[in-house]
Amino acid sequence: MTHDPQLARLGLFDARVPRYTSYPTAPHFGASVDAGDFTSWIEAVPEGSQISLYVHVPFCRRLCWFCACRTQGTTSNDPVNAYVEMLLLELAMLARHLPRGVSLSRLHWGGGTPTLLDPERMTRLAEAIFRVAPMAAEGEFSVEIDPNEIDDPRLDALAAAGMNRASIGVQDFDPMIQKAIGREQSYELTRDVVERIRARGIASLNADILYGLPHQTGPRIADSVQKLLTLSPDRVALYGYAHVPWMSRRQQMIPSDTMPTPQERLDLFETARQLFLWDGYREIGIDHFARPEDRMARAHAAGRLRRNFQGYTDDTSPVLIGIGASSISRFPQGFAQNAAATAAHVKAIREGRFSVHKGHRFSGEDTLRARIIEALMCDFAVRREELLANYATTDARLDELFAAAQATFGEMVRVTDEGFFIPEKARPLTRMIARAFDAYDSAQARHSAAI
């Protein structure tokens, strides 16, 4: 496949750029936000409003080598069971501070592997959550499901608790690639789990698949995508695998010489992308695909697509509260992150306090820049009218910001009286263009250059 040489010149194949699931990104969080701020922000949630809730379970029966998430392996259920008890205490603390009448627009259990929980603990956890806040009428309750770590009793418990969307990690169906990344999961097993999920009336399904994996070629990713399409997921996240063995020790198990080149990665993405489009999926942002009738596709068409720590979402709630070790909460006032180490988080909860140890309080142009970056990541466009109506800015200031980005990217972006736009040919550069509006990244780059 032939690529525009400007993509390479502008750093597509060698730049390491955030995925911008928040702004500022988590590496820029600091100790200026603590548990006291977190508590006051919870208490400031309007009575009767809707919020989102994320519950993190940082345990896996096995540690996949490709994964850079904060998880820990366990062959015993004892630490998982003890951790659930701490989640119940944390939820009780949340209930004491959350104003009356709040309901959940979204509830997500992530990890790790939340399906490590036995049926009884799944039920207890769900009941504890709904004592804090019930699901809203149109609410969505999703759970990350490992096909290797699920059975009928646990599926029954999740369905009875109200799960109405399942999320399954596929990564790749090729046995050689699965062995190379430490994630063996056959197509047949995945298909059977999907059928058992749908047999319980859970119609909504999303799946994750990766490009840029070791030994991955065009024919191999095409075969995996075609197998995934036979499962008819409502939406798919097509993520690029980030090989960072110097940051994630388990990735050292993957030989670096088996990785595709940056140019090959782009070809792999394009191969998968075309297959999803040919099968009738709508392209959502930089790496998602959804059936036209899916809520995410409808939100995208209506200009309501948003971005949070799970990626793209149709959830427009301004408050997301994270429960569990390392979870990040988002409020109109800023971000707050729980202690990353499970032991530190558990110690705080046992002592009757939230474990928040860092975060970021919005100031200056934070919310303006956050919206610009989010709009580019979601819609490849920033509307001047929206920014002027909702943020403390001026036409002159927007002109400055847009001109600075255009100075770097030239004809790969377009500035008009209506706003700032990324043409289709430049969309592989979206994250790099978004970074042009990241004041924290720019400040860090200037600091590094001065050292």
Image (spheres, rainbow, N blue to C red):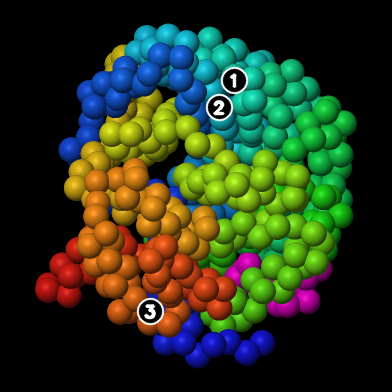
- Horizontal arrangement in the rendering, residue 404 relative to residue 252 (left or right): left
Residue at image point 47% right, 10% down: 101
Where disc 1 sits, the SS reads strand
Q: Quadrant location of the C terminus?
A: bottom left
For the residues bearing labels 3 and 1, Cβ distance under 8 angstroms:
no
Residue at image point 75% right, 23% down: 159
Q: Which mark is residue 136?
A: 1
Q: Residue 107 falls in which quadrant of the image?
A: top right
Q: Which residues make up the magenta segment?
A: 211-223
Q: Nearer the viewer, residue 57 or 296?
A: 296
Pointer 2 local density, CA inside 10 Å: few below 14, some 14–19, many at least 20: many
Q: Which mark is residue 105?
A: 2
Mark closer to the chain start, 3 or 1: 1
Q: How far separated are the C-alphas under marks 2 and 3?
A: 38 Å
- Horizontal arrangement in the rendering, residue 25 relative to residue 91 (left or right): left
Residue 259 shown in magenta: no
Name the residue tied to disc 3.
409
For the residues bearing labels 1 and 2, Cβ distance under 8 angstroms:
yes
Mark closer to the chain start, 2 or 3: 2
Amino acid type, callout 3: Phe
Q: Quadrant location of the N terminus?
A: bottom right
Residue 221 shown in magenta: yes
Residue at image point 84% right, 47% down: 191
